[in-house]
Structure formats: C-alpha cells, structure tokens
Amino acid sequence: MAVSEMAVRGSAKLAERLAAKGAAITSDDIKAAIGVPVNVDVRLLRWLTKGIPPVIEIAATVECKQENVGEVVQRIMNTAEFQGVEVFPYGIPRPDIALINFTNVPEEFGG
C-alpha cells in the first residue's frame, strides 16, 4: 500500500471512493457504504459532494419505508464517516415512508 493511500482515512476515503462514481452513484452504492442489508429498500434521492479533489463534504438524502427507518439510521450512525442525521417521516394519516438526510460534516460546521 502506498504512503498516500495510508494517509487517506475515514470520510476522506469514503468520499473519494463514492465521488469517483460521480453522477453514476446508485442506491446500491449508498447501501454498501453504510452497510444496509440488500433486502432493505433504500432509494437514493439526492447526492452532493463539495470539493474536487479532495472531497470535503458529502450530503445525501435517502428514502425508506417506515419499518426500516431504525435500522437505516443505526447503520448511518455506526458509519464513522457520517456525523449528522435528520429524519423526516411522511404519510397521511400515519407515516409510511421517511426521508433521511445525512452528512459527514458536524452540524455546527454547516452540515
């Protein structure tokens, strides 16, 4: 392993790997990055990177069924690269889906 590869860690490594796909990033890429099982339905709605290269900030929005929200949020929080998570439930008369926003930048720094 090259010295430059050893120096890149954490969110920089994740950002570099995902940003390399650019606009071609898929829901499956996000599921793999956060470790969500294949059978959980997660749909990527928004993907934003700032800084080229290196990527400094990642922001994403995914949609999932209400019964999977807990697992998806837990997987995001267990991924050391992501530090900010917001959940927005949707549905009338009761929530049936949720939008989950997450970023690698702590809230106090603008994420």
Image (cartoon, rainbow, N blue to C red):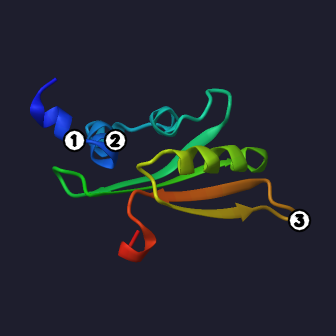
Q: Residues within 10 Å of mark 3 (few under 14, many from 20)?
A: few
Horizontal arrangement in the rendering, residue 89 relative to residue 61 (left or right): right
The foreground one among 44 and 6 is 6
- Residue assigned mark 2: 14
Horizontal arrangement in the rendering, residue 64 relative to residue 83 (left or right): right
Q: Quadrant of the N terminus?
A: top left
- Residue assigned mark 1: 8
Q: Residues within 10 Å of mark 2 (few under 14, many from 20)?
A: some
Horizontal arrangement in the rendering, residue 33 relative to residue 100 (left or right): left
**Residue at disc 2, secondary structure:** helix
Q: Quadrant of residue 19?
A: top left
Q: Residue at x 68, y 43 (%)?
A: 71
Q: Position of residue 32 (x, y in %)?
A: 49, 32
Which residue is farthest right?
93
Q: Position of residue 15 (x, y in %)?
A: 31, 45
Q: Earlier in the sequence, mark 2 or mark 3?
A: 2
Q: Which mark is residue 93?
A: 3
Horizontal arrangement in the rendering, residue 76 relative to residue 55 (left or right): right
What's the amino acid at mark 1? Val
